[in-house]
Amino acid sequence: MKLYPFRDCVEMADKLLKNSKNVETYQQFQCVGCGSKQTMEYPFTFYTIGHCEECDRLTDIQRDGCNFAVVATRPRPKQTSS
């Protein structure tokens, strides 16, 4: 996973959310301890510190950089009465 400066990711995610409907963003970071890719649990939220679920280390995301995943959803069609 390519890492980008924290502020750049926040700004890009903000632009995406303003211009798109039915998307969610999930912050991702790479653990400084074991190198595993971690994805935050809550959408639309960017954290400056990340906790690795694999090795229990903390990563300074603001210093080390991050990325984010985008999940696109389709709106549910309106159901008609039969």
Image (tube, rainbow, N blue to C red):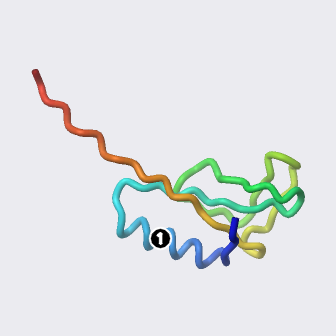
Residue 34 as seen in the image, left or right of residue 64: right
* Residue positioned 76% across, 62% down in the render: 30
The N terminus sits in image quarter: bottom right
Query: What secondary structure is found at the residue carrying circle 1?
Result: helix
**Residue 50 pos. (x, y %):** 75, 58
Where residue 14 appears, x then y in whole percent?
Answer: 47, 70
Picture residue at 85% right of the left edge, 63% below the top: 32
Q: Quadrant of residue 46?
A: bottom right
Q: Which residue is mark 1?
A: 14
Give the percent coordinates (x, y) of residue 77.
24, 39
Circle 1 crowding by C-alpha within 10 Å: few under 14, some 14–19, many from 20: few
> On the rendered structure, is 75 left or right of 78?
right
> Between 19 and 49, which is closer to the camera in this rendering?
19
In the image, residue 76 lies at what x, y percent?
29, 40
Q: Residue at x 62, y 48 (%)?
A: 41
Quadrant in which the C terminus is drawn: top left
Above/below status of 35 relative to 12: above
Q: Nearer the viewer, residue 73 or 50?
A: 73
Q: Amino acid at mark 1?
A: Asp
Which residue is the extreme one toward the front?
1
